[in-house]
Image (tube, grey):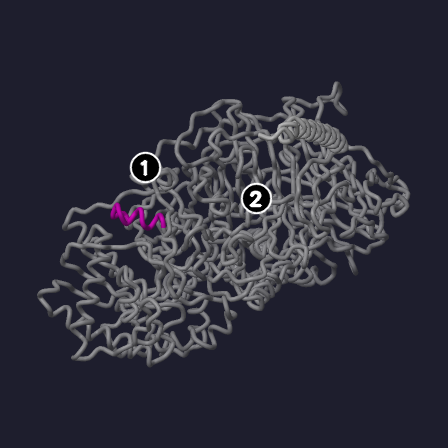
Amino acid sequence: MPKSARSTVPTAWKLMIVISVLYLLCVWLGYRHLERTLFQRRSSGQVFQPKLSKDGLQLYVKQCPVTYSQRHGHLSGPVDTRLAKALKPGMCQASARPVRTNIQIESEWRSISVAYPQYVYTVSGWIQVLDVPTYTPKPLKVIIVPHSHQDPGWKSTFEGYFQSQTRDTLENMVNFLSAHPKWKFIWSEISFFEKWYSGEDGGDRERVKRLIDNGQLEIVTGGWVMTDEAVAHYSAMLDQLVEGHQWLKQNLDITPNTSWSVDTFGHSPTMAYLLKESGVKNIVIQRVHFAIKRYLAKKKSLEFMWRQSWDSSGKTDTLCHLMPFLLYAIHYSCGPDPHVCCQFDFHEDKCLRGTETVPRVAVNETNIRKLSWALWEQLQKKAELYRSNVLLVPHGDDFRYDSSSEWEAQFGNLEKLMEYMNKDPDMNINLEFGTVSDFFNALKTDTEKSKVSFPSLTGDFLPYNDRDDQYWTGFYTSRPLYKHMARWLHAKLRITDILLTLLCAGDTTSHYCRYLMTLEESLPQARQALALFQHHDAITGTSKRYVVKDYASKLHGASIVIDDILKKLMFLSVAEGQKDAKRAVGNVSLTMAEEWSDFVTPPSLKANYVDGKWFVLVTNPLTIQWKSVVTVRTSSPSAVKTKGGGLVAYQINPVLDENLKPVLGLYDVVFEADLQALSVKLYVVSESHSHGKYVSVTLFGKQLEPVMFVEDFKAKSSTVETIEIENLLLRTTFSSCTGTLQYTHRKLDDVIHKTAIKFVTYGTGSWSNPFRDKSGAYIFMPDGQARSLDSMYPPMVVLHGPVMSSVITKLPGVVHRAVLYNVSGPVASGVHLYNTVYLTPPLYDNKELVMRVESDVLSPDTSVCVDLNGFQMHKKRWRSKFLIQGNFHPVTSAAYIEDENHSRLSLLTTETHAVASLRPGWLEAVLDRRLMQDDWRGLNEGVSDNVQAVSRFMLVTEKKKNPLQTKGPACYPSLLTHLLSTHLNNPVQVVALREEKYEFKYKSEVNFMTEKWSCLYQLLNLRRLPVPRKGKVEEGQSALMIVQKAGLDCSYTEVYTDCDMQRFILLDKFLGVELSSVKQTTLTGVQELEILQQYAAGLKDMEIKAFKVTFK
């Protein structure tokens, strides 16, 4: 090596060492700088969280400082331990009993695969996942059931469908069945049937009756609509069933004994129970998660005895037939191969095999053998999935059989195939047209002969999924305003029915009662509008925009009718000596305190512009004594007293607009109402400018200034990080940075729980896969974890008063209000949460707004108990294979989580929401959704017609006192949350009364119950029954009384009110009511079961019973 080269080596190494040292020094200095920067950022409440925003790349996100709730050395007044009214040992018996069943759906999910074929493409996009590769031929009896599924509103309105298709379908049905004695048909929707029947002459009516009598036409289910089973409340589900069954009894003298529910988006055991107790013995269902169908098919358990999860005796067992394939359409009816079955649709050209069209052909001598053997093979494959030799084959689809050409084509071609196949001894098959009853009768005969039995099954079939990971959990929230209004309106209808029945339970010939009967004449139309909205494309929010408006208009019209009747009934209840009811009503001004003025906006308090003295009527719709808080809006500061001049706790609140700024010249008067069971009470309101009890107002945020408020509120600004409000039972802590609740402190047992409320949003779609489907009206397809709303130190108004205190926060898209009511009763035991949501473009395009509660009540198995239709509760476990969307459940009234320390956190609601517990300690509810695209389920549009929506929740924390071991999927509310939920869904009704011409004498309070009922029982309804049109006319007017007994978790004993826990109730303890007879009936009141000699009823836990009470 040359010398010059050797001399350069040490120099090169030295240079490399220097560079390395300098590099390490730079890395160290950079690390130290980053460490100092992160420390400074953390100190100022910021964290390193890079994300792409509209302003570019954002590396740091500012976070709110942690809020703490500390135990105080003193309370703001002594805690009255008498408030802790609890159940004594033996007063409450646990509802949980061991339930034996062959199949428990929630447990089976551990073994059920949700795998869906990938990279297999079809023209429709849907794949038949239930394959039958082999079969063993057996003799078959096949019942072909022609049907036409008629939606009372979806892509067209109820009236639109009736004019364009339904009327023609029914007229063709009568004509063709009358001409062909072997043809048969079924019909489900009574809303359509009633409209057609009322417009027909006597000849067609008689023909319909003959068709029903000879078994050619069967009315199945008999509900006003094919009700939704996920988001509808059970009392409304039952009411629409009563409406349909009563009409059928009055007009056709029939009672359905089979049910047909093929298009509801999932199925609930609640509906099965209501049907069972209404005289329905057998049911057919269709829309069930594809994985469950596949699993049950392998076990040959698609026919089962559906048992309630709380029924240990099997008394509620109902035989259920589950259709095995994707849909109820002809393509999916005869067997597992749609490209074969579609050949037997002889009217429409929708037959495809891959991308090739299979031509529609009529049956003739050249092709009948080929078609017959193709059909025979499909029937044998389908029969392989069942245990018996009797097969149900539906033949129909949406709005089919509306033309004479279709009737002739379908029945004519099917008759040729049936005749050919029945004569072929090699096929050993018997096909015939039949009804659903024909099928179940044949099934019964076959199974009795072959000694085949069916497994018992408990659980629900929610959520529904028809394809891959596309869970139908979006409709649990779609169009939330009308879900809320349906519940709001149902509560009004219930108390209207009850008051109307009791006020005229005696002599119906008096002038007083005759006037009430004129009021009743408009009630059926309102009742039918609410029943119509229970349809599975109405309350679900899955109709076209203009159809949604039509439903909303019908609901709004019903509310006007019901409000008009209700306020008159409440006035007549307390007005003394008014024999001329019509004249008395005409001499006063009556307005509901809260009115629904426009169907595109939520209800709001109506301002009363009155000088001097006026009256407020408050009704308690519950059958127990109850303390509530009432708000009326006035044009001047006012005080409240009882009729006798007694003091009433009240306060005066400012009225705030959507920006939390005060509305000058208006005040909210808030007062405590102590009400007897099922009563109407009168309060006196008078101006009080100088001595009014104004709340104190504290403002947060630069947008709000004290000078905006009148001096009486003594408004002041604040910048403190921690805010507290409290009542007799609770102290709650809020963060001024987030504007929401953080902690709840129960005073009586000194327990603090983290109950942090956050508002988050889910997006939809996928950057990595632009072909991935997005959320729509039906399905929920999030693009990942939820994102927090970007809002810190929002505008806030804090109110402190003697009756209630609240924290009101304005966040992007939502005004959130947390309230504590300061009354000595159950309503003080939780935090009341009110949301007013308005999702506007473009901020909320393709977003879903969620209210999340993050707590320290950590469920050990990540399970959550959710209610089914407000009737019963099931335990649901979080499962990773369901992804985010499949772990949401419909919550109609309540959900709760529990931890190993015997703590429970319950979230009660007044309308249905999609609710999930995605992590231990979390409960989240979807408030509204704005989707810009269709989700390929037939609607052909998104959900972008958002209107202002309201939601109400109550957050309750409890502690077990007597821990009980419970097993199985059924779970139960505590007595406290049961009573609170009943109250939330049946709130007090308030009427403002002003005298105009005369001064009346009033009763201070009218109690319609001479003896309050047990807290275990609930009066679902008491409605007048129509007088029979023929047959024996009973002496006196009759009414249908529907009663339910709650199933409870007795581990939680605090109830904060005096409760009678008797195991029975007396049915004749109503004011001024004498009964001549009481008969137990089916739930819809059309079949009498037994006569009660003693007017007392004792129900088992969870039972619902109906009684026909006849007045003297």
* Looking at the image, residue 42 lies above or below residue 985: above
**Residue 640 vertical position relative to residue 657 in the rendered view, above or below:** above
Residue under the point 67% across and 26% down: 14
* Outermost residue toward the bottom in this view: 405
The answer to which of 290 and 605 lies nearer the viewer is: 290
Q: Is residue 789 visible?
A: yes
Return the residue nearer the eye: 640 or 873: 873
Residue 45 lies, in percent from the top left, at: 74, 34
What's the residue type where badge 2 is placed?
Gln
x, y (%) of residue 848?
A: 60, 51
What kind of element bears circle 2? loop
Residue that carries the numbered disc 2 in the rendered image: 785
Q: Which residues are magenta?
A: 291-301
Along the line of sight, the residue nearer the viewer: 1011 or 469: 469
Task: Identify which residue is drawn at 32% across, 79% down.
Answer: 175
Q: In terms of secondary structure, what is the magenta stretch mainly? A: helix
In the rendered image, the vertical position of residue 413 relative to residue 1075, given as above or below: below
Q: Going by the image, does 394 lie left or right of 1099?
A: left
Q: Is residue 664 left or right of residue 320?
A: right
Quarter of the image containing the N terminus? top right
Is 350 a magenta residue?
Answer: no
Identify which residue, 338 or 494, lies in the foreground: 338
Q: Is residue 299 magenta?
A: yes
Horizontal and vertical percent position of residue 41: 74, 33
Q: Residues within 10 Å of mark 1 (few under 14, many from 20)?
A: few
Say what secondary structure mark 1 lies in. loop
Question: Looking at the image, which residue is at 75% across and 18% down?
Answer: 73
- Please state if 655 lies on the left or on the right of 1025 as rendered: right
**Residue tagged 1:** 313
- Residue 478, image x and y in percent? 56, 55
Look at label 1 and name its amino acid: Ser
